[in-house]
Image: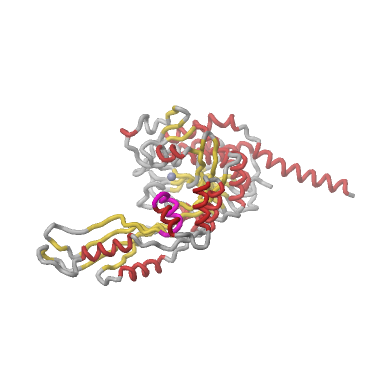
């Protein structure tokens, strides 16, 4: 009786093969012209914010989607700064996948540009333009994934949601992610999300590492406010608030929070050690030990400040406001601090510890509570999505090491993660020099044309892996 059973297995196998093969069977060379056309068209719409005018970008996307028979919805707190959502329906077996990119870009200083910043000029193998890699590359890649899946009629186990969000770069009014999460969360609720925040390192024409952002530090701010008796500069006073504030700033500004690794940073340094020159590798491994020696930590503070920031909550003085005249003792002076906390930091305890450290009743610690980003736990390293990203990396960037990363800066993934979405930051491949000199928010921004195409394929593979019907 095994004959029919084998047939049944073969039939099931064929079905499985069909959706998997479908997802793999894209002729990528053939997609390049269209990918480039969309990417360039998106850059050519000036959406620098403020004011943003993201609705212009949405109108372009709307026309592309509707020409393919994909309907869109626009959600706008302010008419010029809309968000756009499109959805490919799956069979509902699994919760949706969200592909998110922002439509605004940072402003430009035109005199710094060798080409028109909104020309999307092709030169030397690069696409030049504001937004070419922040974030219209992801926007174009997500668009291509939607179009291809629709054209190929890929059967889906989960919906794929496309979100073009406004106001990522500058959003005092909360028109972007805050609005979508608070007012239209049903439209974007998902199990997984892919968006900006990661990248890939090109070295000698080959991608050697792929960074997937899985968590980020939590921005918090506070002021130290010192008060005393005002008076004439000719009469010294022991309660001069400037003297008291200066002592407090010196204490807090040099205070070192305890070092602590989490799953992401531990895995990051382990993997980084595996691909680093021996001396660097030895230092990364020392960080993984029970009590990393002080001289190693000092080395990072001096030589690798970004790595140092991932080791602990950082507390950095950024603004001093003090004094009204050279012969006047002020009655109130203040200093502002930028805190970038580890995701699991006990922030109220940190503030009370700082008060104890300052130990001066004339100086108060005042947390700034406006526009706080939510605290959220890290996205998992053992999820179906993370594994799909590792598989996509192995396929497209063979031999590259995948590193989970914790951003020291904040992203709109904080809001998604706080709502329970496992969000992962990805990005295009670039040399280190290009990332520094022509990266996001640089005077001049550019993306290797080939990196745009591999980003589309990377996003496609990862998306199909978790969403195509199995
Ligand atoms: Zn961005």
Snapshot quadrant of residue 436: top left
On whether residue 304 falls in the magenta region, the answer is yes
- Which span is picked out in magenta? 302-313
Of the pair 284 and 49, the residue shown nearer to us: 284
Q: At 24% across and 70% down in the image, what residue appears?
A: 362
Q: Please indicate whether residue 447 sits to the left or right of residue 97 in the image.
A: left
From the image, give the main secondary structure of the stretch colored magenta: helix
Q: Is residue 304 above or below residue 204?
A: below
Residue 340 in sight here? yes
Q: At 62% across and 40% down in the image, what residue appears?
A: 395
On whether residue 350 falls in the magenta region, the answer is no
Q: Position of residue 206 (x, y in %)?
A: 55, 36
Of the pair 200 and 25, the residue shown nearer to us: 200
Residue 188 in sight here? no
Q: Position of residue 40 (x, y in %)?
A: 46, 32
Q: Position of residue 457 (x, y in %)?
A: 58, 38
Looking at this rendering, what residue extends furthest in the right direction? 1
Q: Position of residue 77 (x, y in %)?
A: 40, 50
Q: Please indicate whether residue 172 sits to the left or right of residue 412 in the image.
A: left
Looking at this rendering, what residue extends furthest in the top direction? 123
């Amino acid at each position: 009786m095994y004959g029919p059973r084998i047939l049944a297995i073969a039939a099931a196998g064929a079905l499985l093969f069909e959706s998997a093969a479908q997802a793999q069977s894209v002729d990528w060379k053939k997609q390049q012209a269209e990918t480039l056309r969309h990417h360039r068209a998106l850059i050519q719409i000036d959406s620098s914010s403020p004011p943003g005018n993201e609705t212009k970008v949405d109108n372009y996307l709307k026309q592309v989607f509707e020409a393919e028979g994909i309907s869109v919805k626009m959600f706008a707190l302010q008419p010029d700064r809309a968000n756009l959502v499109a959805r490919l329906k799956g069979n509902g077996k699994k919760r949706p996948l969200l592909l998110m990119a922002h439509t605004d870009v940072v402003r430009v200083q035109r005199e710094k540009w060798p080409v028109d910043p909104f020309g999307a000029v092709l030169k030397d193998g690069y696409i030049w333009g504001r937004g070419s890699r922040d974030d219209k590359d992801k926007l174009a890649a997500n668009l291509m994934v939607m179009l291809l899946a629709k054209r190929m009629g890929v059967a889906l186990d989960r919906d794929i949601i496309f979100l073009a969000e406004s106001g990522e770069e500058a959003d005092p009014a909360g028109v972007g992610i805050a609005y979508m999460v608070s007012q239209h969360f049903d439209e974007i609720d998902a199990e997984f999300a892919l968006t900006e925040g990661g990248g890939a390192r090109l070295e000698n024409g080959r991608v050697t590492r792929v960074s997937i952002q899985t968590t980020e530090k939590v921005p918090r701010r506070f002021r130290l406010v010192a008060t005393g008796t005002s008076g004439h500069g000719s009469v010294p006073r022991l309660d001069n608030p400037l003297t008291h504030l200066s002592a407090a700033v010196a204490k807090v500004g040099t205070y070192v929070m305890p070092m602590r690794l989490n799953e992401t940073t531990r895995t990051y340094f382990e993997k980084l050690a595996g691909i680093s020159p021996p001396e660097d590798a030895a230092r990364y491994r020392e960080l993984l030990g029970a009590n990393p020696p002080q001289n190693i930590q000092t080395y990072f503070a001096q030589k690798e400040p970004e790595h140092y920031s991932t080791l602990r909550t950082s507390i950095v003085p950024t603004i001093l406001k003090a004094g009204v005249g050279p012969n006047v003792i002020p009655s109130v002076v203040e200093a502002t601090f930028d805190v970038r906390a580890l995701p699991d930091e006990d922030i109220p305890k940190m503030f009370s510890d700082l008060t104890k450290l300052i130990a001066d009743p004339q100086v108060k610690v005042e947390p700034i509570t406006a526009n706080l980003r939510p605290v959220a736990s890290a996205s998992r390293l053992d999820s179906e999505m993370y594994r799909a990203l590792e598989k996509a990396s192995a396929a497209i960037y063979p031999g590259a090491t995948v590193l989970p990363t914790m951003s020291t800066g904040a992203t709109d993934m904080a809001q998604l993660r706080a709502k329970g979405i496992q969000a992962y930051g990805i990005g295009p491949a670039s040399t280190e020099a290009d990332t520094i000199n022509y990266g996001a928010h640089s005077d001049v921004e550019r993306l290797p044309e080939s990196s745009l195409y591999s980003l589309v394929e990377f996003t496609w593979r990862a998306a199909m892996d978790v969403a195509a019907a199995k």
